[in-house]
Image: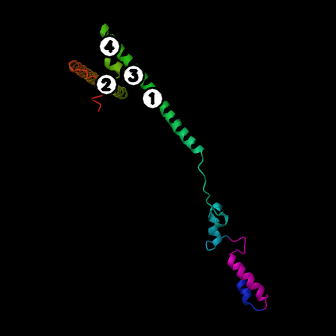
Amino acid sequence: MSIRRLLTRPGSLPAASLSTTASHILRTNIRFSSTAPATIVEGTFWRSLIPKPFRRENRTPSTKKSREWNPATFFIAIFLLIGSMSIQMITLRHSFDRYMRQSEARITTLREVVEKIQRGEPVDVEKSLGTGDAKKEESWEEMLKAIERDEAARKAQKQEKARQAESIAKAAAIAEMEEATSTTEAAPRKARTGSLGNFF
């Protein structure tokens, strides 16, 4: 029998005690039977779906404190930068070493083929250099392109050095010419005598 029916029946219980109990029960939405499943109409069902840390009753009022700057932050940032740069240097060194080993292996292969050709031995150049194998051909093309780039860079450096040498030689020649003209101009001039008459 529900509480509302008890309240409406005359003489069953004192009305004052039931009215306060009923209003209290209706406000809190407590289920009266523990065997009945929770329904979606009840608010407790929806509250139970919210994780406990996010519920209103579990929240603590957050007071923002102004935290001072931690002096260790600078060192942490610097050490992170230094560590990342050292890792990059290590990977660069390993990649360069691998490239040098591959280049040396290819150069020795070329040298052997050229020596066999010079001695007059029959050599299958295509087989020894890997013609027909897509990976080997691609690696040879990369190596040839790298050699071309290196040669272009070396030529540019030589040209730059030649230009610098020419400009230094021109500057030295101009300085010698100026020095020669200044000595010829300075010789005929008369040295002035120091007197106080010219001072006033």
Q: Which residue is mark 4?
A: 114
Q: Which residue is mark 1?
A: 95
User: Are dots 2 and 4 in contact, CB under 8 Å?
Assistant: no
**Residue 82 in the image: above or below residue 188:** below
Give the crowd class for mark 2: few <14, some 14-19, many >=20 residues within 10 Å.
few
Gap between marks 3 and 4 measured at Cα: 16 Å
Residue 89 or 197: which is nearer the viewer?
Answer: 197
Looking at the rendered structure, the secondary structure element under dot 2 is helix
Q: Which portion, as a residue range, is magenta?
A: 11-36
Q: Which of pointers 3 and 4 lies earlier in the amino acid sequence?
A: 3
Q: Which of pointers 2 and 1 lies earlier in the amino acid sequence?
A: 1
**Residue 62 in the image: above or below residue 149:** below
Looking at the rendered structure, the secondary structure element under dot 1 is helix
Q: Quadrant of the N terminus?
A: bottom right
Give the crowd class for mark 1: few <14, some 14-19, many >=20 residues within 10 Å.
few
- What's the amino acid at mark 1? Ser
Q: In which quarter of the view is residue 21 placed?
A: bottom right
Is residue 84 visible from the viewing direction of this image?
Answer: yes
Furthest-top residue in view? 119
